[in-house]
Image (cartoon, rainbow, N blue to C red):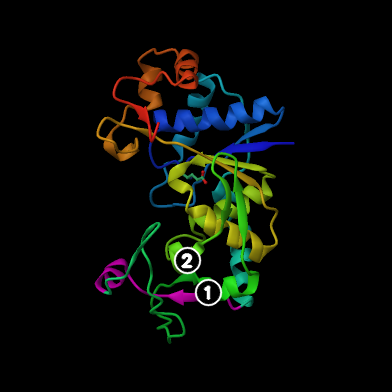
Amino acid sequence: MTTTRFAPSPNGSLHLGHAFSALIGHDLAQARAGRFLLRIEDIDGARSRPELAEEFRVDLAWLGLTFEEVPAQSTRLASYAAAAERLRQMGLLYPCTCTRSHIEALSPRMGAEGLIYPGTCKGATIDPALPAAWRLDVEAALARTGPLTWHDELHGPQTADPREFGDVVLVRKDAPASYHLAATLDDAADGVTLVTRGMDLFAATHVHRLLQALLGLPVPRWHHHALLMDDTGQKLAKRRGSPSLADRRNAGEDGRALAERLRKGAFPAGISLANA
Ligand code: GLU
């Protein structure tokens, strides 16, 4: 059975890009008589606004989407800590006390997700008094797993290349897991067989595939859909003030009609699909 998911972070209201993504996950599940899950990704303590979870549920219902909600990430911290401990026991994590400005000052290479960490703390003696993140030793991890592949329904077979990210943080200084670790564990725990999300997370899948291999998790398929862009060619984003779904709903717009238009590719003025 196909199980898809929509996994928003409650750090801002949902916008049209989220509606588009949720519709794709919902409709793919429906077309295959499968399940469509909602998972609130609220590990980002400082930025999470708990009241937004309810807003998201109402938004999805307004669009005419039915979903099954699975437990929010904030209730799963023990599973993240256990997985991090396993990786630590395997000798694949190392503590890192570098700050962002310290890393920037080292002029590292740019990778898929910004600066590639140059490995300064790997093998170094760490001051235990300083807050530490835990990073994955990607070379050691790959030496253990060997080459890995994954499959995207839209983009075909892929060879995992997690080096594009460098030694990613799996346990943050300020949170018990990073997005990569939490989302990978949750997709497995929730029985997700088709990870539906935007192209902005395509490269992250290389890291997720590596984590699956290390932790013995089932390997789903992926469906990374094109992103909606605004008229400046940038992806819609909460921080650029794209109108939220809640604003549209409160203004009396018909959510189901909006969903139908998005399905047909009839986007509001100024909005288009990337590379379409
Ligand atoms: N929580 C992530 C976000 O809101 C999405 C994660 C995912 O779909 O894997 O951007």
For label 1, the crowd category at 10 Å Cα-Cα, with few meaning under 14, some 14 to 19 and many 20 or more, is few
Percent x, y of residue 105:
24, 72
> Which residue does the image show at 38% across and 66% down from the upper left?
116
Q: Which mark is residue 163?
A: 2
State left or right for residue 248 relative to residue 203.
left
Of the pair 152 and 121, the residue shown nearer to us: 152
**Figure quadrant of residue 215:** bottom right
Res 140 visible: yes
Location of the C terminus (image quadrant): top left
Lower position in the chain sequence, tag 1 or tag 2: 1
Percent x, y of residue 125:
43, 87
Amino acid type assigned to the residue bearing label 2 in the image:
Arg
Percent x, y of residue 130:
38, 77
Asked if the residue under mark 2 is in contact with the one under mark 1, i.e. CB atoms within 8 Å, the reply is yes
**Disc 2 secondary structure class:** helix
Q: Which residue is mark 1?
A: 139
**Disc 1 secondary structure class:** helix
Res 7 visible: no
> Which residue does the image show at 26% across and 30% down from the upper left?
231
Measured Cα–Cα span from mark 1 to mark 2: 8 Å
The boundaries of the magenta stretch are 91-105
Q: Is residue 242 above or below residue 190?
A: above
> Which residue does the image show at 44% across and 12% down from the upper left?
254
